Amino acid sequence: MATKELRDVDPYAAVESLRAALTEVGIVFPSLRVDPASPELKLVELGRVRADVANRLADALRRGGRE
């Protein structure tokens, strides 16, 4: 269950934090953005990525971001 603290995260800051973390491991999500259709929900839209990018993301997560 989500706590109030987790729901209070600024979605714009979350997008920039995720973008920076992905960049550190050489991954780009071209469509990464705050969902403009539901600002009250503070949703982050990851968008679509090519299969090779999804595979690199899975590898990075398994490594814990370590090269």
Image (spheres, rainbow, N blue to C red):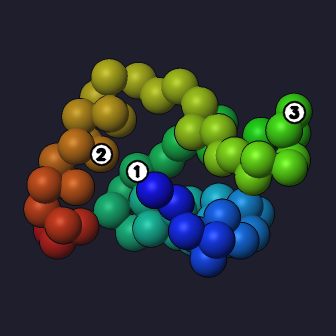
Q: Amino acid at mark 3?
A: Ala
Graded by Cα atoms within 10 Å as few (under 14), some (14 to 19) or many (20 or more), the crowding at tag 3 reads few
Q: Secondary structure at mark 2?
A: helix
Residue 27: mark: 1
Residue tagged by mark 3? Answer: 37
Residue at position x 53%, y 25% from top?
A: 48
Residue 6 falls left or right of residue 13: left
Between residue 52 and residue 12, name the one nearer to us: 12
Q: CA distance from mark 2 to mark 3?
A: 26 Å
Give the image location of residue 29, x and y in percent.
53, 42
Query: Mark 2 or 1 closer to N-term?
Result: 1
Query: Eyeballing the image, is 57 above or below 8?
Result: above
Q: Amino acid at mark 2?
A: Leu
Q: Secondary structure at mark 1?
A: loop
Count of numbered marks: 3
Graded by Cα atoms within 10 Å as few (under 14), some (14 to 19) or many (20 or more), the crowding at tag 1 reads some
Q: Quadrant of residue 19?
A: bottom right
Residues tagged 2 and 3 counted as in contact (Cβ below 8 A)? no
Residues tagged 2 and 1 counted as in contact (Cβ below 8 A)? yes
Q: Amino acid at mark 1?
A: Ile
Q: CA distance from mark 2 to mark 1?
A: 7 Å
Judged by depth in the image, the label closer to the viewer, 2 or 1, is 2
Give the image location of residue 13, x and y in percent.
70, 71
Residue tagged by mark 2? Answer: 57
Question: Quadrant of the image for the C terminus?
Answer: bottom left
Q: Secondary structure at mark 3?
A: loop
